[in-house]
Image (tube, rainbow, N blue to C red):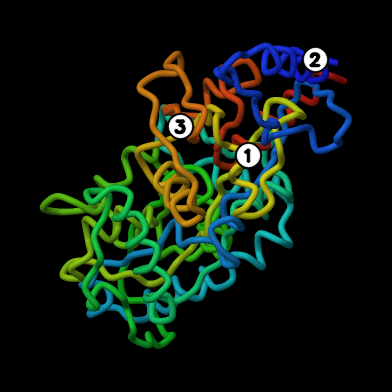
């Protein structure tokens, strides 16, 4: 009824205008997909940024190793590669509760795990896109992704030297030393689950806050022998290949759109991204991989966007309006945006909580 009234009013104004000064508005580009002109508040996943980027997603996180470990203990490198190669199969077969238990004591005191029994299930695990692929075969995809990020923000990363990509063949055998393995909380931590499950005493595992992960590979005596890092950070900080080399990609994206109203369209392909025009899109970590990747996808789709200084800033009608959210804590149905881009496991946890509140 509201759209019908709007159309009648616009027609009356257009007919009354002497010189055509008032123009009728075009149809809302995010009409309710049901086509009945009605909408209801909701909070549900409405799109997968990984599939919008491309068939194989994007190389979101990578595993690096100290070059000194490669030179001194190839058996340790071979073992870690083997554990990573089995990660997706293990995650598919293991019970979520088992995975949570494996990871729970790897966090430092004071860090609350984002992965817990309430939010980790088979679908969330699948959505985290954990699948290892060796560096030698990922150089082109990795560099292409980094180039897209640089086109968005020239300071966000660098194209690494060829020496950054490990192309050796480590032989299995007896491991000579003991090694510290680090990953940031969230989807990258899942990539370590199979390695932890293998219970090899040569490796000690640590899961830290995402803001603390870069510190594990920098400084005079970096703590991490092996480390999972966001791909842009790994390339920017370690891309010379002098101290660390990349063993492979471990996750391929875990970012999902959430819509707040059934009138907002679902985002199923790049053409559907035009539905975001005129809307406010809250982006968790806008200045980092989530926001950079979204901007790269919008650029590829030819969709104009702007970054708003605050949630209360007016939205442009001819652009996608991106709003920064520091983390997923403040994301919710009443947080003020039409859509959100949120990582797993928070995306499922938030949407499930909304559905539970309605039941």
Q: Identify whether 92 is placed above or below 86.
A: above
Q: Nearer the viewer, mark 3 or mark 2?
A: 2
Please tell me the numbered disc located at residue 109: none
Left of 133 or right of it: where is 176?
left
* Residue drawn 39% across the image and 38% down it: 209
Q: Nearer the viewer, mark 2 or mark 1?
A: 2
Direction from residue 4 to residue 238 in the image, left or right: left
Does residue 181 appear in this view? no
Q: Label 1 neighbourhood size at 10 Å, few (<14), some (14-19), many (20+)? A: some
Residue situated in front as seen by the camera: 312 or 282: 312
Identify the residue position indicated by label 1 in the image.
275
Q: Which residue is mark 2?
A: 2
Q: Which residue is mark 3?
A: 322
| Mark 3 → mark 2, Cα distance in angstroms | 27 Å
For the residues labelled 1 and 3, the Cα–Cα distance comes to: 14 Å
Label 3: state its secondary structure: strand
Residue 281 point in image, percent of width and height = 53, 31
Q: Pick whichever, 198 or 318, lies toward us.
A: 318
Query: Comparing marks 1 and 3, which lies closer to the viewer?
Result: 1
Of the residues under marks 3 and 2, which one precedes in the sequence? 2
| Callout 2–callout 1 Cβ contact below 8 Å | no
Q: CA distance from mark 2 to mark 1?
A: 20 Å
Task: Quadrant for the N terminus, please.
Answer: top right
Q: Secondary structure at mark 1?
A: helix
Depicted 287 relative to depicted 16: above or below: below
Q: Label 2 neighbourhood size at 10 Å, few (<14), some (14-19), many (20+)?
A: few
Q: Residue at x 51, y 75 (%)?
A: 82
Q: Residue at x 58, y 39 (%)?
A: 115
Q: Earlier in the sequence, mark 2 or mark 1?
A: 2
Sequence-wise, which precedes: disc 1 or disc 3? 1
Image spot of residue 182 (x, y percent): 38, 52
Looking at this view, is 109 or 232 the one in front? 232
């Amino acid at each position: 009824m509201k759209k019908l009234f709007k159309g009648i009013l616009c027609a009356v104004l257009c007919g009354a205008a002497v010189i055509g000064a008032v123009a009728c508005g075009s149809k809302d580009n995010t009409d309710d997909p049901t086509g009945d002109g009605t909408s209801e508040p909701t909070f549900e996943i409405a799109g997968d940024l990984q599939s919008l980027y491309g068939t194989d997603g994007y190389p979101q996180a990578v595993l690096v190793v100290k070059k000194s470990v490669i030179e001194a203990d190839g058996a340790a490198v071979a073992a870690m590669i083997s554990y990573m190669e089995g990660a997706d199969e293990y995650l598919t077969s293991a019970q979520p509760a088992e995975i949570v238990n494996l990871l729970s004591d790897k966090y430092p005191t004071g860090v609350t795990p984002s992965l817990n029994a309430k939010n980790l299930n088979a679908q969330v695990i699948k959505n985290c896109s954990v699948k290892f692929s060796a560096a030698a075969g990922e150089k082109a995809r990795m560099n292409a992704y980094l180039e897209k990020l640089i086109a968005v923000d020239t300071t966000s990363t660098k194209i690494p030297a060829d020496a950054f990509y490990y192309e050796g063949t480590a032989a299995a055998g007896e491991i000579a030393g003991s090694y510290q393995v680090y990953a940031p909380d969230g989807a990258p931590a899942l990539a370590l689950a199979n390695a932890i499950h293998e219970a090899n005493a040569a490796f000690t595992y640590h899961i830290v806050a995402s803001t603390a992960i870069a510190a594990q590979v920098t400084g005079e005596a970096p703590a991490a022998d092996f480390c999972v890092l966001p791909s842009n950070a790994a390339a920017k900080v370690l891309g010379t290949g002098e101290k660390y080399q990349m063993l492979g990609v471990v996750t391929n994206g875990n970012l999902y759109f959430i819509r707040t109203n059934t009138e907002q369209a679902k985002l199923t392909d790049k053409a559907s991204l035009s539905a975001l025009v005129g809307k406010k899109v809250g982006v968790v970590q806008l200045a980092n991989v989530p926001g950079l990747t979204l901007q790269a996808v919008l650029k590829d789709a030819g969709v104009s966007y702007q970054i708003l200084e605050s949630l209360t800033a007016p939205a442009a009608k001819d652009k996608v309006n991106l709003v920064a959210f520091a983390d997923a804590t403040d994301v919710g149905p009443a947080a003020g945006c039409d859509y959100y881009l949120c990582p797993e496991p928070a995306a499922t946890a938030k949407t499930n909580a909304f559905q539970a509140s309605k039941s």
